[in-house]
Amino acid sequence: MYIKSLRLSHYRNYQELQVSFQPNINVIVGKNAQGKTNLIEALYYLSLCRSFRTSQDQALIQNGEEYADLVCWLKEEKQESYLRCILHEKGKSLFIGKTNISKTSEFIGRLNVVLFSPEDIYIFSQAPRARRKFMDQELMKLSKKYLFHLTRYNTLLKERNVLLKKASIDETMLDILDKQMVTSEVEILKRRSSFLKFINQEIERLFQSLSGMKLRLQVVMNNGIEVDKIDEEILLKAHLFSRQKDIEYHITNVGIHRGDIQFRLADNDILLSASQGQKRLVMIAFKLAILHYIEFISKRKAVVLLDDVLSELDLERQKRLLDVVKNGYQCFITTTYLPDSLKLEKLNCISIQDGKVKI
Ligand SMILES: Nc1ncnc2c1ncn2[C@@H]1O[C@H](COP(=O)(O)OP(=O)(O)O)[C@@H](O)[C@H]1O
Ligand SMILES: [Mg+2]
């Protein structure tokens, strides 16, 4: 599947834009603050119904306008369709073709994208919540079942924490909630662990071929719950084991809401020993492994969005990254100038100036 074209109205610094793409490499060239990332953000929004730069949808509407209208046309084999999102002051309206979609979850995942951005590496030093959220988002867009169990678990967790804050604790109610929670927990843990198993089969090879360094790289999971086997009975015991502490602290101390992933380069936590350059390559290898995972699960290739990533790499690494992504993926690459690594490629080059395509 690939994105054939995009139309933006009253979106960020685009008053009106209509632009066509090709199925392989599309380069968006322009000086700073011209709208390159805005364009990538629009494609990302049409995939996930949220921006990677702001949680405020209103910020996407062009200053002084009342709504923004984003449409992309998709082509898959002989089939064509389009995704449309209208943002207005009351929220958003979503369409797949002419059909109005009321559930965001039905819209998400029609178009799958993987974004590579220089800011990605901050996730290594952020709180566990950020890494967990990142993993959950990847898994949610690929599995409605995952989304269902995660939502259900979070609702039950809230109820449990409310209960733990009361002056007198109803332990029978805690028993009931625990039993309900672990059924979702099992599903989530199984999916998270098969995701990481897949990533670990790929990430080291990808990192080594990008970096040329023969270092070991692994992503390890901390489940938020100390169990070596995942089944309901064992999880129930873990919750029960923590119950006195939970009552004392008025909060649920164990469970998938405490899960985290750790990146280990040469058997050390990446935060302790890796250089900035190594962190960057680990993140790129991670994203490439995710790209392969999406294909493995959905049997479709995701669209690759490289926002300002090439300029951070030397020529050799740019070439190595491009060798992986140009292999059948549609790519969007933003850059301030056309780097040497792209000069020999057959590309669709789009020059952007002040929210307009420069011809
Ligand atoms: N809601 C908005 N309305 C109008 N202009 C906007 C809006 N949001 C951002 N911009 C403008 O978009 C430009 C930044 O675009 P961006 O895509 O980040 O640039 P770059 O080409 O460097 O990636 C800035 O000039 C900014 O003022
Ligand atoms: Mg930018």
Image (tube, helix red, strand yellow):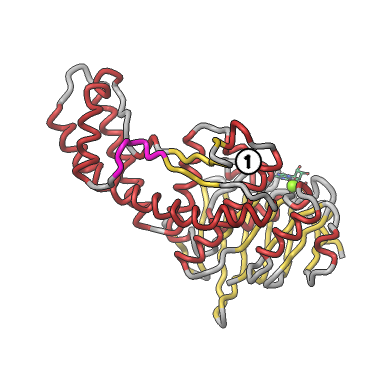
Residue 252 at what x, y percent from top left?
30, 29
Image quadrant assignment for residue 123 = top right
Residue at x 87%, y 65% (from the top left corner) = 359
Instruction: Give the x, y percent position of residue 274.
Output: 64, 37
Image coordinates for residue 162, horizontal then vertical, percent: 27, 27
Q: Nearer the viewer, residue 59 or 232?
A: 232
Which residue appears at 19% of the width and 41% of the height?
A: 179
Dot 1 amino acid type: Ile
| Ligand 1 quadrant in view | top right
Q: Is residue 85 magenta?
A: no
Is residue 139 toward the left or the right of residue 149 in the image?
right
* 189 left or right of 55 in image: left
Q: Would residue 142 be visible to someone looking at this image? A: yes
Tell which residue pokes out farthest to the left in this image.
172
> Above or below — where is 69 with respect to 31?
below
Decide which of 85, 137 is in the foreground and name it.
Answer: 137
Residue at 21 percent of width and 43 percent of height? 180
- Above or below, comparing residue 53 to residue 5 in the picture: above
Any magenta on residue 223? yes
In the image, the segment drawn in magenta is 222-228
- Check the picture and name the quadrant holding the N terminus: bottom right
Which structural element holds mark 1?
helix
Query: Residue beneath label 1, please?
Result: 121
Q: Quadrant of residue 271?
A: top right
Q: Pick the residue in front: 83 or 146.
A: 146
| Residue at the (78%, 69%) spot, across then down | 347
Q: How many marks?
A: 1
